[in-house]
Amino acid sequence: MTTADRFYSRLVTRDADSEHDLPDAVRRELPRNGLRLVAANTLQSSGDQTVNASTVLPWLFHVIGVPAAFVGLLVPIRESGSMLPQAFLTPLVVRVRRRKWVFVTGALVQAVSVAVMAAIAALGHGTAAGVGILAALVMFSLGRCLCSIASKDVQGRTIPSGERGQIIGLATSAAGLVAITLGLAIRILGGGDLDSTELALLLVAGAVLWALSASTYSRVVEPAGEPGPRGGAEDGDGSSSWFADAARLFREDATFRRFVTVRGLLLVSSLSPPFIVSMSVAAGTGALTGLGGFILASGVASLIGGRIFGRLADRSSRLLMAGAATAASVVAVALVLAVALPGFDGGSALGATVFVGAYFLLTLLHSGVRVGRKTYVVDVAEGDLRTTYVAVGNTAMGVILLVVGGISSALAVIGVQWALVFLAVLGVIGAVSAVTMPEVSRGAAR
């Protein structure tokens, strides 16, 4: 047994039957590939922390004097921008025999984009700087889009079912540890007074992390697949139409349609945390202010949740999604009820603890939903169908995210608590729907 074998076996509960189904060449490289994927995904997730659209970039905009109206564009550009183009790009991606090079290209695009943001942070100011960073964020989102399409397929080709969730969970936990270290460093060295130069250096570190991720991912030994067709569905005039492919997939594939529907309903854990921050500020608590505090909280949640949820995802990814979404809905409603109690004081130690606890729990549970859905989509399909599932599903989610985010934001104008209740109701409906999805995890069959 090689060193890589021993190390991989200590980190992952291996599935001998599933590994036996792999081609010999893939099985020989499994331990090294598994460790490389964990390392590359850890570097990528760590880089994400340095350009977080909910914490770092809003903080940067404030420091360099970007108009407040621009802040509201950050999350939609980052999230929807990385999802909406995926169905359109899929016909190009499936032509590539080794999809790892698609990921490497996407990671390098992200590295360059963040380096551009760092230069603007160091030299720019005001509206022009905001426009430049938003433009770089659009380019960043396209790189993220390529990584998202390719990563599921590479993992499906190189890691057997029963171990994929653990790989995702390990990377999540490791990135959480990096985030904790980063958060503590910011709190100790910068506190609440980080200037543009220090933030630029933080972004430079992010660019380096993505470059290292690309380098590590390039060493994954991936079996070559057959190149996909040069077009998608044929229109009446013979031209290809990715939109027709996507529409047909929704119409004819009930499993895919249900997965996208459930995923769209499980946004409670991802969209609720910003509303909790808003409630805490309105209530007078300062416990969640400070960039280091945000990064620290998300890092602790990832560290704890990644390992646990990775194993649970390999047992049953659909039940993990259902359970995590239900718990997130309960947390959101419990917070609304707690804040509504007579005499509740957000500025007190108890009030701050309530907000911090709710924020942490929702971030933790979001790790569960995220690991569960990623594992499910890798297990539910094979080959180019998996690539299509990921791309078309993410494109649909880009639209759903805008719709649900718009509704919750409109409700927040009436009262933030109504937005949380709305998301909690969706979460419960999604959890019930997730239970009815087909079981695809090998662990559930034991």
Image: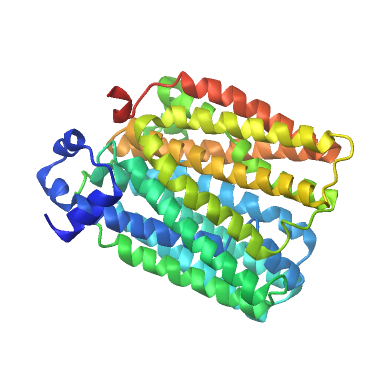
Q: Outermost residue, right direction?
A: 343
Query: Does residue 98 appear in this view?
Result: no
Image coordinates of residue 206 in percent, x first then y, are 50, 68
Out of 179 and 374, give the one closest to the viewer. 179
Query: Does residue 197 appear in this view?
Result: yes
Image coordinates of residue 411 in percent, x first then y, are 79, 35
Quarter occupied by residue 228:
top left
Image coordinates of residue 76 in percent, x first then y, are 64, 49
Residue 287 appears left or right of 23: right
**Residue 323 sits above or below residue 1 on the image:** above
Out of 274 and 339, give the one closest to the viewer. 339
Residue 357 appears left or right of 173: right
Residue 37 appears left or right of 278: left
Residue at the spot 57% in from the left edge and 77% down from the top edge: 201
Residue at the spot 28% in from the left edge and 36% down from the top edge: 161
**Residue 347 sits above or below residue 338 on the image:** below
